[in-house]
Image (tube, coloured by chain):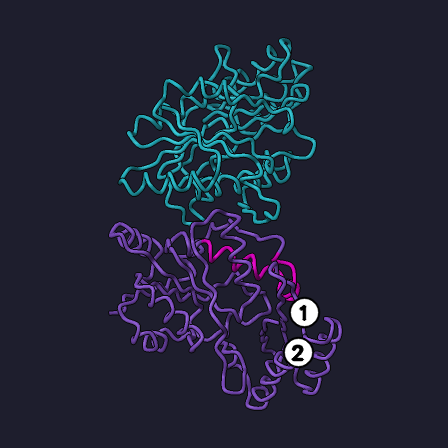
Chain colours: A cyan, B purple
Amino acid sequence: MIEVINTSKEMSRVSDNIKKSGKNISFVPTMGALHRGHLSLISKAKKSGDAVIVSIFVNPTQFGPKEDFAKYPRNLKKDLALLKPFAPLIVFAPSAKNIYPNDFGTFVDVEDLSCKLCGEFRPGHFKGVATVVLKLFNIVKPDFAFFGKKDYQQQLLIKKMAKDLNLNIKIVTCPTIREKDGLALSSRNAYLSPVERKSASLIYKALKTAKKMAKSKNAEKIISFIKRFLAASPLIKVEYASIVKKANGAAQILIAVKIGSTRLIDNILI
Amino acid sequence: MIEVINTSKEMSRVSDNIKKSGKNISFVPTMGALHRGHLSLISKAKKSGDAVIVSIFVNPTQFGPKEDFAKYPRNLKKDLALLKPFAPLIVFAPSAKNIYPNDFGTFVDVEDLSCKLCGEFRPGHFKGVATVVLKLFNIVKPDFAFFGKKDYQQQLLIKKMAKDLNLNIKIVTCPTIREKDGLALSSRNAYLSPVERKSASLIYKALKTAKKMAKSKNAEKIISFIKRFLAASPLIKVEYASIVKKANGAAQILIAVKIGSTRLIDNILI
């Protein structure tokens, strides 16, 4: 059975009961418009044997005033049909009013991470993400929470927030799921016209080639290669291409582009 | 027995065990330098029959660069002696490094409340308060948390944060405890010289007289009376005197003054 819950109060009560019964909760927060990327997270969550809660909430505070909040795809009926094979499952689908009452005014900021990369192009975005995820965590009370690696900076931010705010939640990051031509699955791919869709496949091709180059070339050469490679399509406007070093010595190449008015991101480990 | 715990990890583990045993947790966050005001909160917390946890932590992020963080009184041994009559009790006394590791960088801001009144004179103060209280809540996992009414804006802020971030914690506000001459108990009273201490008693006298005036006079007259009344002492510098209306139709007069370099606050219901 798929149980749909619409208010924070009821969700919180149901979560309390699950915890009291001694079960763990695995949580997959989404904005709906579910695709195979989301389903892979839910599939992973289900494997634990925990109670699984999926939230569907298009979070207004993470969209800029000129961004696609209004047109972001919403289709709960279709989403629920896609979730059916995962029953039993709890879906938390609150209204914006329920999450942000009129007098709402408390925000969380992961200061170091919220202004870089995507944060530079989407001011306020990560403050909105951190705030809603913390609220959802407090309502759903998960032991595990699942995020996709496609939103690389987002999962870094959530991990940092969980550590900094002493949340006792294990953040699990799952691999990016791709179309046959390599394009990372995203609810925003639906915005692309056929010709835009075709050029979008260049993003992952650029990343794969850059990964091969990484054995012999330095960061500067790799970045300038990516920019030249993507310039091959007049439809693609690169917001940034960047290499982020990790604590373990590895690095990640991150790309954000605009194709028409559609913003797409992707990344690869090198 | 008084059990003293020094790390977040151990505190979190102990709290988890208390919750698993089916007990509630009542929490009294303090900065130490305990006085009868703190003890009244602990006494109230003990009455519930819950496990009681008292934190002692002088929180660096709520002090401005020119404020009294360095000189703030710290005497754990004396504090523990004062707590002895409340045994069994758990004292959480972490180091600053344990609460704020080097790479720490996530802050909580209750935007509407953090810039007014005290926030105007102590920029960043309430961001530090909200952040540390949220961290302590996440570590200690209380069902009830106790705050004094002397810090009126602080308890409003914590209640707002708890509501906005969906914390399932009941915030209990307790009456201000006073010296015989009416001065509200504060760890900072220890900074006052005998002559400053004497003039400090004017603060509550001003509030009490203002409360009587409130039946017949308007807000403007009351505020100007308070300012004139306190101007009687050349040692007192008023930061603000303000009347805040409440949802239930009542109101609160709030005062903040500097006496020498010591900042004191007080308030009264009208």
Stretch in magenta: B113-134
Tell me the crowding category of disc 2: few under 14, some 14 to 19, or many 20 or more residues within 10 angstroms, Cα based.
many
Q: Nearer the viewer, residue B40 or B59?
A: B40
Whether label 2 touches label 1, CB < 8 Å: no
Dividing the picture into quarters, in which one does residue B93 lie?
A: bottom left
In the image shown, does B111 or A3 lie closer to the viewer? A3
Label for residue B242?
A: 1
Label 2 sits on residue: B210
Which quadrant would the C terminus of chain B be assigned to in this image? bottom right
Whether residue A251 can be seen here: no
Name the residue located 64 percent from the left edge and 38 percent from the top edge.
A123
Residue B38 location (% of width, % of height): 42, 72
Q: Are marks 2 and 1 on the same chain?
A: yes
Instruction: Measuring from the top left, give residue B157's x and y in whole percent.
Output: 55, 58
Q: Is residue A12 left or right of residue B232?
A: left
Task: Give the secondary structure at mark 2.
Answer: helix
